[in-house]
Amino acid sequence: MTLNPQRTLGELKALRALTGDEHGAQRVAFTETWLAARAFLKERLDALPVEQHQDAAGNYWATLKGESERELLIGGHLDSVPNGGWLDGCLNVLAGLEVLRRLSEQYGGRPPVTVRLVDWADEEGARFGRSLYGSSAASGHLDVAEVSKLHDKDGVSLKDALAKVGVKLDDAPQARQELKNAAAYLELHIEQGPVLEGLGLPLGAVAGTVGVERHTLTFHGQAAHSGSTPMNVRKDAFLAAGRFGQEIYAIAARHGGVCTIGSVKTLPGIVTSVVETCEITLDQRHLDAGKLAAMWQDAQQAATRFAQEGGCTVNFGYLWKIEPIPFHSELIDACEAAILEVTPTAHRLPSGPLHDAAEVARAGVPTVMLFVQSLRGISHNKIEDTLEEHLALCVVALDKLADKAIGWIEGRA
């Protein structure tokens, strides 16, 4: 069977029409639209000689049995952020589907190794604030007690949302058994950033995912009347936080990482009062664990200094962290070789965003990712896009990478 990248492109457009609107993709995890996307995938898998099932965490698997029980996994996620892009996540799944078709046809339904396509549940974390839910359950890094406290903006708990799609949260860690025979994991994704476009390259091999530190910083000052309190005697928590907000750019530049203040909340939150309390969230990322730790240390020192200078105090709260995850060196080489078979130049780059591949790698499965260029470097936005010729190239490159991974697995038997 000849690989048909144009079929993948057509399916991506059909899924966009089915699960998007004028504001973008609406495949938020565990909603009716997400279920419609899953049904779209199942309908196409039904035409293949694969075994299908939803695991204990809600991840969806299609297994093409091979001569060996050792498994090549190809993964992605159908869920999106609200008003998201048409390619984020679903490109991975539908390109993997096309590779599965080709392998099934070429080998008469029984390739040399078992090949499995997985749609990870709730990669985005857009609804409950906890990214990589399904893959972390499979990797053994899901804390059920912790996530059982999560609720969406409408007050629906993660536990109840899962129950509506046939999943018991307490059983989610049983998904670990899905990786017991995994020998390699591949994931294709849009870059979601500007590097490849800036280099004029369609494809890149991903060296690993950056580590992430997320914390809250709460500055405490003193409420006072905004009209009668002179500027030089104010204890303005927002001023201290604002000065810190400027400093994080210097911290990022100093260490070669990135820092983001994503939210700000003030109390009493009225126009006639100096801010007494200002809580901010800080996201810091770096591919080097030591530099990431240094960035957080610098952030704490800077926050403490600005608080003291403004007559305020500051305390720190932990949100979440994941260490930098380097991908498998031999699979990175294979990915680069696959790219060079379809385009003259390959480039290696880290991934700033988190992906399910990070959790699979944490579980000890040899892993690599393939990036395709994102126009304008924009994602999580309805204008997210990639040139159609680049989409076709990435499907071909993923297919060639799958063949190389199969050979690599056989060579390690």
Image (spheres, helix red, strand yellow):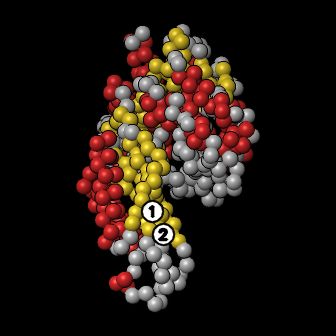
Q: Give me the disc on residue 218.
A: 1
Outermost residue to the bottom? 228
Outermost residue to the left? 254
Q: Is residue 108 above or below residue 271?
A: above
Q: Given the image, on which type of amino acid does mark 2 rest?
A: Thr
Other-residue count near label 1 (Cα within 10 Å), few / some / many at <14 / 14–19 / ≥20: many
- Horizontal side of 72 relative to 159 (left or right) equals left
Q: Position of residue 37 (x, y in %)?
A: 67, 41
Of pointers 2 and 1, the one earlier in the residue sequence: 1
Label 2 close to label 1 by CB (< 8 Å): yes
Q: Given the image, on which type of amino acid does mark 1 rest?
A: Thr
Q: Position of residue 90 (x, y in %)?
A: 57, 40
| Residue at mark 2 | 277
Residue 380 shows in the view: yes
Q: Position of residue 50 (x, y in %)?
A: 64, 20
Look at the numbered disc 2 and give the secondary structure of its residue: strand
Camera-side residue: 277 or 168? 277
- Please identify the quarter of the rendering in which residue 138 is found: top right
Q: Residue at x 43, y 25 (%)?
A: 364
Q: Residue at x 69, y 54 (%)?
A: 155
- Horizontal side of 33 relative to 213 (left or right) equals right
Q: CA distance from mark 2 to mark 1?
A: 7 Å
